[in-house]
Image (cartoon, rainbow, N blue to C red):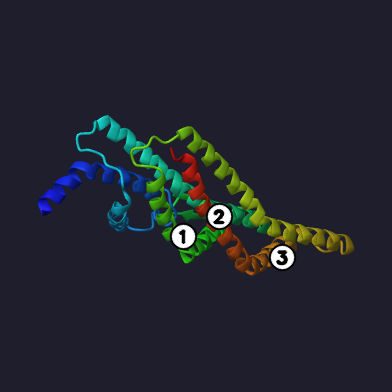
Amino acid sequence: MIMEAIESFLETKFLAWLLASARIAGIFTSAPVLSAQAVPLNIRLLSFLALSYLSLPAIKDVVWLNTSIWDVVLWSMSNFLLGVFVGTVASLALYAAMYAGEIFGIQMGFALAQVFDPEMREETPILGQLSLLLATYVFIALKGHMMLYKTLLFSYEKIPVTASVNFSELANEMLRRVGDVFLLGVQFGLPMIAFMLLISLTLGVISRLIPQMNVFIIGLPVKTLLGILIFAGLIWVWADAYGEVLMKFILDLDHLINTLSP
């Protein structure tokens, strides 16, 4: 009985499982937390294998072992790109938070203050990195990784592992989501922009009333101090707003998968 079950799995399900694992591999290369370079490679590999095993019951497709190797390669590439798309869309919400942090830093005079980002392997603005860390915390606190796993299982139901993905539609959807990143970053940064504009106007009025005061010398430290206080006060409001945006991005994935389904 055991040998028959193993033979049946190898003949009908083994290649389907490999194709499904290619979709999971795409998610592990782009999704937040799962693709983090700070996580050791062996931990990510074990997580990938565990997730592939847990996803096996959701795979209903049958791919015979004698299937053409060219079909398997083509389907593997399609599933991998689909996984990259799903992980990237989930990561875009974090990039919007990082972009908003960069706007905060520019307004506060931290435009040149940069730290090395091990994820992107380049220097990024310090407040952008802090905003990204806070966004990652919100992502984990809201169990975004579990919602992403549910989206993966939903994708197996709507888009079979042997389906051909419409890459033009995939690219168009990606471009729309990238545009949303800049829009959300500006929306998150508007309170800081408004406060800094008000502070600049106040300093301008003071320079007119007290000409002896050197506004250029006191302006930068005043903006930095008030900016830090404003940023600290906005963290709780920002976290709630970001949580709503994150939920919207992940829930939109179900709609996108329905759109891409054959």
Direction from residue 84 to residue 207 in the image, left or right: right
Q: CA distance from mark 3 to mark 1?
A: 38 Å
Who is closer to the viewer here, 254 or 234?
254
Instruction: Describe residue 250's horizontal placement relative to residue 8 as left or right.
Output: right
For mark 3, give the secondary structure: helix
Residue hosting label 3: 222
Q: Amino acid at mark 1?
A: Gly
Give the quarter of the image for residue 101.
Answer: bottom right
Q: Residues within 10 Å of mark 1 (few under 14, many from 20)?
A: many
Residue annotated with mark 2:
248
The answer to whether residue 52 of the structure is visible from this angle is no
**Distance of label 2 from label 1 (alpha carbons):** 11 Å
Q: Position of residue 145 (x, y in %)?
A: 43, 59
Say which label, 3 or 1, has the lower sequence index.
Answer: 1
Cα distance in 3D space between marks 3 and 2:
37 Å
| Of the pair 205 and 168, the residue shown nearer to us | 168
Residue identifier under label 1: 144
How many residues crowd around disc 3 within 10 Å: few (fewer than 14), some, or many (20 or more)? some
**Label 2 packing within 10 angstroms: few (<14), some (14-19), many (20+):** few
Q: Tell me whether circle 3 and circle 1 mark residues in contact (CB < 8 Å).
A: no
